[in-house]
Image (tube, coloured by chain):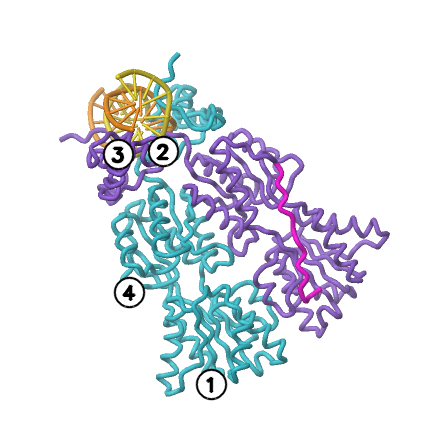
Chain colours: A purple, B cyan, C orange, D yellow
Amino acid sequence: MRRLGNRPGPPEARPGAPTLEHVARAAGVSTATISRVINSPERVAPETREKVRAAIAATGYVPNLLAGGLASNRSRLVAALVPGIAASLFNETIEAMTQALAAAGYLVVLGLTRGGPAEMDATITSLLARRPDGLILTSAERSAKVRKRLREAAVTVIETWDLPARPIDVAIGFSHTAAGRALAEFVLASGRRRPLVITSNLPRALARLEGFRAVLRERGLPEPACDMRSVDSFSINGRERLAAHLDAGGRPDVVVCTSDLVALGVLAEASRRGLRVPEDLAVIGFGASEAGAVAWPALTTVRIDGAEIGRQAAEVLIGRAQGREPTRRRIDVGFEIVARDSA
Amino acid sequence: MRRLGNRPGPPEARPGAPTLEHVARAAGVSTATISRVINSPERVAPETREKVRAAIAATGYVPNLLAGGLASNRSRLVAALVPGIAASLFNETIEAMTQALAAAGYLVVLGLTRGGPAEMDATITSLLARRPDGLILTSAERSAKVRKRLREAAVTVIETWDLPARPIDVAIGFSHTAAGRALAEFVLASGRRRPLVITSNLPRALARLEGFRAVLRERGLPEPACDMRSVDSFSINGRERLAAHLDAGGRPDVVVCTSDLVALGVLAEASRRGLRVPEDLAVIGFGASEAGAVAWPALTTVRIDGAEIGRQAAEVLIGRAQGREPTRRRIDVGFEIVARDSA
DNA sequence: CTGAAAGCGCTTACAG
DNA sequence: CTGAAAGCGCTTACAG
């Protein structure tokens, strides 16, 4: 017998995975009815429904969402563009989002945004090839070219962990400038006057620095000392940075860090030099990591509810699939300074 | 004009995304040729190839992999089942795998394995509905039902971070028993004789404990003190555990912890009580986290090359898609005790 | 409430 | 080296 049409792919690939056809035959109804039982059961008569459900269970049918997505033009896939998931601030967001979306039948695909704009573009293309129903960015996108690309993709795009003035589509995050200002107020309220800021030079970290500086300026205080280098904030070694500053004659009374991990390094260096924290030197982190919470002294830090960002993103995505437009295009989840022992 | 067939989905969804048809028209060739240029360019005449590439660029064509996967029976999707990505040991593995797979045109989808066996089963079904070419588990699967299910799915299944005697398909990891033994040898070699083990009660942690105990037993030494509770290892508060043990009269000279985070808590409690580390009390973690590396004193720990696990997994997956069977079904990436300052 | 049938956008065996 | 055409497994407008 001649093989008609296609059935390629590796020979071992699911030889006899049951299809709608099989279930239809088993239940004695049409494939359309099976599909309805799965996707809009309320449109099917109760008895038919039960009969079909029994047939689904008996055959062990698992719908092919590749085919379903192609037919319905809805993939139920959400793509998350992340800078890396090892020790990432965004993990809580991705995790909460994954969980909320799973409950609605969606799945999350991961795209790593390493490298320059060219790699970013390639990653986006590879993601769009899956026809995701939504795209989650873990920051405000700054490249005009990429912004244009995403706008044209006509897909729900959610920028997270930031609040750009003009989001591509929807933004869910908080104001980094406001966080920087709050940090400055906190420092000043504690009576410290010689802050050292150890920061990465990524846009959001710089926005925080800007807010921090603005407050000092408004109070007529001098510019803060600042160590700002072009490295990824998670691998900055706070220990070395503090050491370098002290060795150069700096005498800060508080160190404001770009991340908890940097702050942990600062804590370690302070301890090694016999500086008492917070008496001699206060230390403040950013991100409220678990490691910071168990540190000694426990790290004062800024907490962002990353899970809440993820849940809100899922809500926007699911809502739009049902025709509900989000009420706001910029959703502020705020932040909170967690005063613990280190400052 | 009557609308023929389907074109449903949300109205805003990619109204005019170009298809193969458009590109074929623009290039003046058949759709089959476009497909070949994309998937097996060597089978197309150079001039045709260039003409087609120009047409692809001109139209901004992005292949629909939902359709491609359906037609070819290869989704180029790999599903990773993870217990959570916030602060997870597996993140390096997922990240390295994602990166390696991306280079080969694959994408990673995430499934969260929270809850009991029922949820696990639901997650697997939802994942299989995408017809992934591979399934990555972040541990050896222990439920017989799930094992059976996965074997029947006839998909490449890779169990990671462990080395079960009989893998479902392929396993990439290391022996937790051997790691526990190595830890015991290390402790004994340093002259310590009163270990306290703070461990989670998950299977792999228990396997390490077993190895640890076996060495002591073989040397005729007494059983180690052991705090083993049924909580997730990442949220165990090492501080409380050490405090409870000391308050109950325990006098350990070394604490062997189930994770770096627990060890950090132990370090904090020791510092608070004025115990010198490692003179009065040595502390050992597990996992070689960044936070442990910047701690003071720097944490002695066990390093597993999680990224290597991810790369090997990608290799197996990609190889099999090309018809190459992995040479071994159990791949040992080993582990390494990293002696730093705390022990 | 249910079914027959077109169509989603690809891939590839076959023929030339 | 290239094209015509069947088929992948679904969904849904339409008709009854």
Mark 4 surroundings within 10 Å by alpha-carbon count, few (fewer than 14), some (14 through 19), many (20 or more): few
Q: Is residue B251 visible?
A: no
Along the viewing direction, whichever of A5 and D3 lies nearer the viewer: A5
- The residue depicted at 60 percent of the width and 66 percent of the height is B294
**Local SS, label 3:** helix
- Determine the residue positioned at 84% across, 54% down: A221
Q: Are marks 3 and 2 in contact (CB under 8 Å)?
A: no
Q: Residue furthest top?
A: B1
Q: Which mark is residue B193?
A: 1
* Image quarter of the N terminus of chain A: top left
Is the residue under label 1 in contact with that under label 3 (CB below 8 Å)?
Answer: no
Question: Do circles 1 and 4 both sit on a common chain?
Answer: yes
Residue with the mark numbered 4: B165
**Distance from label 1 to label 4 (Cα)?**
32 Å
Q: Nearer the viewer, mark 3 or mark 2?
A: 3
Tell me the amino acid under the disc marked 4. Answer: Ala
- Residue closest to the eye, A69 or A14: A69
Q: Residues within 10 Å of mark 1 (few under 14, many from 20)?
A: some
Chain containing the residue with disc 2: A
- State whether discs 3 and 1 lie on one chain: no
Q: Residue at label 2? A: A40
Which stretch did the figure color magenta? Answer: A329-343
Q: Earlier in the sequence, mark 3 or mark 2?
A: 2
Left or right of B172? Residue A183 is: right
State the separation of the CA atoms marked 4 and 3.
Answer: 46 Å
Q: Callout 3, which amino acid? A: Thr
Residue at 28%, 46% in the rendered image: B323
Q: Chain of mark 3?
A: A
Using the image, name the chain to which the residue with label 1 belongs: B
Front: mark 2 or 4: 2
Inter-mark Cα distance, 3 to 2: 13 Å
Label 3 crowding class (10 Å Cα cut-off): few <14, some 14-19, many 20+? some
